[in-house]
Image (cartoon, helix red, strand yellow):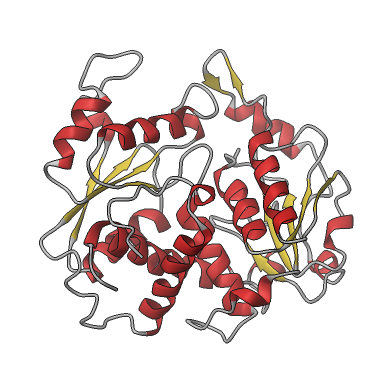
Amino acid sequence: MDLYGKDFICTQEWAFEELMAVLDLAAEMKRDRFSERWAGILKHRTFFMFFYNPSVRTRQSFECAATELGGHAQFLEPRAMRLKTAKAAGETVEDAAKVMSRYACGIGIRILEDQVPYYGAGDEMLREYAYWADIPIVNMADDRFHPCQGLADVMGWAEWYGGGPGQPDYGALRGRNFLLTWASGALARSWCSVQEALLIASRFGMNVTVARPEGYDLDPQVYEWTRQNCAAHGATFRTTDDPLEGYRGAHIVYSRNWVTPQAYQDGVFQKQAEIEKAMAYQGWTTTAERMALTDNAIFTHPMPVDRGSEVTDEVASGPRSAIYDIAENRLHVQKAVMALTMGGADL
């Protein structure tokens, strides 16, 4: 399958067969991580990484991926690049994208909720880069989507219900029950990771439940896509404001804090107000007692985990926690994405 030059901004925009091409290659790369087959795919090539927001796993995993493919990942801070903003003169996206296309094999961009004036602005910026660039744009997390996290998630779930590390069984996910539950927390998190989880779980035929307090619904477009994905597989999609109901019979529990749709006022992200609002809610922490209501579910989370608020240590570090497996899979799925979209190799 020829994916060379293709942008990766949201999993919903890729065909299922394209997603599987990445996931199959990622599993092969995981099983034979340091094979010479992969070592020269990006030889002498550079991948630019724009970080408007800091990270742990994202920077580390992309730099490791580029190195293991024989290339180089260059860390860039936009504030040091004289780029045009709403408040300052500088280089336009058109000019920056066209020049960088002459240097690099791909551009990754990470821009989250506190670096944009309204929900969706970060995603719009990525798409503007994609319009002008002649090389692939990879979403390293924007304020709407986090496609690399979504692929790492589903690969990890399929490994747990398949043959273990490097042996995912995606068919084993079909018909299983996926719970995405809002959780208390003091980090005022964006919607990108949880929305990708909804999209990817529904693309693989899972029954999806979103549990959240009233006033914490996610993007209506993502809800609609999730509903359509579920319907295409004969699966169900529902929301509930009951903090316990969704656990019953669940096979995968994803517990995560996220902000309300009113997080922006007058072009400013209201971080402290969102934290205070979230911490006022009680009874939305994933505990061992709640996990006992499930069908021996695994616990999943994109990290960093707000332990004690989103989930207890007993669950996050317990025997049914998939968090470290999924964190590792960020490396493998990103290697596969880079190899297929930037390497042009016959894999």
The quadrant in which the N terminus is found is: bottom left
- Residue at 20%, 22% in the rendered image: 91
In the rendered view, does 164 fall on the left or right side of 131?
Answer: right
Number of on-image labels: 0
Residue 75 placement (x, y as % from top left)? 24, 47
Residue 134 placement (x, y as % from top left)? 22, 41
Residue 251 placement (x, y as % from top left)? 75, 70
Q: Front-most of 33 and 310?
A: 33
- Residue at 28%, 64% in the rendered image: 339
In the rendered view, does 182 fall on the left or right side of 130?
Answer: right
- Residue at 27%, 81% in the rendered image: 34
Q: Front-most of 295 and 51?
A: 295
Q: In which quarter of the image is residue 130?
A: top left
- Residue at 27%, 30% in the rendered image: 79
Vertical placement of 323 versus 203: above or below?
below
Residue 81 makes an appearance in the image? no
Q: In which quarter of the image is residue 109?
A: top left
Vertical placement of 294 versus 89: above or below?
below
Vertical placement of 203 versus 191: above or below?
below
The quadrant in which the C terminus is found is: bottom left
